[in-house]
Amino acid sequence: MKKAIISFINRIKSMGKIKGILYATILFFVGLTTFSIFSFSGRPFFNEINNLIHAVLILLIFIYILIYGSFRFDIFFILLALFNITVLISSVLSGFVNFRITTVILSVVAFFLYQFLICENNRQDTVRAILAGSLGFILYFIAVYFVPIFTLDFSTRLGFYFDDVNYVGRYFLFIYIFFLFYVLFQKNYRLIPIAVIALFLMVTTGSMSNLFSSVLITIILFLFFIPKEKRYILVISIFSLMIIGFLLLQLDALDYYRERIYGILGSVLNISTLNSDGSTEYRSILLTEAFYMFLKKPLFGYGFYSVASYSLTGQFSHNNIMDLLANHGIFATLLFEYLILAPIAKMSQKVEKNRALYIALGIYIFIYQMFLVTYYHKFEYFVFALLYAYVYEEKDKHFSFSMKIHPEVKLENTFLIKEKLNHAKNP
């Protein structure tokens, strides 16, 4: 960590005064935006503060790219644009009922953040800024729920102060993924307590979907970490943890988790000796309603928030794919799924340790669609920018536009064509 801080300071110094200050300010606002998404985005009024912080971040990045970089339009831009066009068509055909520009704004955020993250050093510093903002949220959460956390009171689910507890649990799982990666692959073992705390706080939210996801993501990260010839250690560890988990579930303090897990197994596997889980069965009804809505308007759906507006239950489907199908139709759904899966597929061609983090993030985004609606949530688009920046290659088809301020000339407007750059350097 000390080495990374020294390297960061030296890099700032080498940039020059104005560029260094602007760069450091952007990273500060990345951390602040992360903190505000986790802390404010699910709360009325405070969400406006979060939106303001978002706006400042994008303005800073826009200025930075305008002066020192170039705007790149490639497959990421095309997918975001096509997705939003299909959403807009859906809204037009539905008479703009419940119309929102949420996905457009979040796509703009992702696009500009992507421009900044293309540079590997920028990406690494951004991840560290995200970790700093995450630490702030952990401390804020502990301050709000100090008593139940330190008395190990699991009688109620924690997190409603911030947002729907399932989304709060999701924030902690994102944090856990980042810190576990640094522990395993950067060998920063001093971060183990933070990874454990994030996982523990996720458990306090009582989110079964995140509990399941945390197990799967942990296994994925360890699959990358443990050499192939020693994978038997992982298998033994999984079975050992299953036994320990079963024994822990027998504790009275974990009544809620025991009833939920047994109930889910009873509902999904139709085991008559186990009680059914009301939440699981209710979600199956919501899924069925959303599916029927999709069948009636399969191409462009009913528009924003239609499942919650038109279903008998008055709830969204708790499934991102089904909500997308019902709200915006098959085209928007396929584009959004491709947006997630394309960088994951491309990562298979990379052979370096950092890919474990981005594959884990991508897989988590994909599988969590089964449990909640995510296509209009903010941190999703932060992760999209990270994933596409990680698989970025200069040779990929793209169009770039630059208005750089070069040290030796005044502001100039130029298209980044290699021949022109070579001519400018060697007239």
Image (cartoon, rainbow, N blue to C red):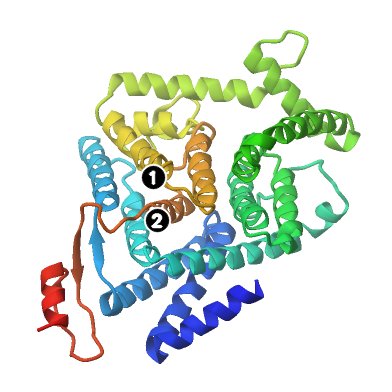
Specify the farthest residue to the front.
229
Q: Is residue 382 above or below residue 372?
A: below
How far across and how far down the image is residue 395, in percent? 25, 55
Side of 300 where 181 appears, left or right: right
Quadrant, the C terminus: bottom left
**Label 1 is placed on what type of residue?**
Pro
| Figure quadrant of residue 182 | bottom right
Inspect this view and state whether residue 165 appears: yes
Residue closest to the eye, 337 or 40: 337
Q: Position of residue 188 (x, y in %)?
A: 69, 62
Q: Residue at x 70, y 54 (%)?
A: 195
User: Which quadrant of the figure has residue 425?
Assistant: bottom left
Q: Residues within 10 Å of mark 1 (few under 14, many from 20)?
A: many
Chain-order first, disc 1 or disc 2? 1
Residue 139 horizontal/vertical position (percent): 71, 64
For the point 59% across and 77% down, the residue is 5
- The spot of residue 130 in percent (x, y) is 55, 63
Element on which disc 1 rests? helix
Task: Give whichever of 256, 130 is nearer the camera.
Answer: 130
Q: Which residue is mark 2?
A: 385
The CA distance from mark 1 to mark 2 is 10 Å
Q: Is residue 5 left or right of residue 121?
A: right
Find residue 343 and name its label.
1
Q: Residues within 10 Å of mark 2 (few under 14, many from 20)?
A: many
Residue type at the position of mark 2: Ala
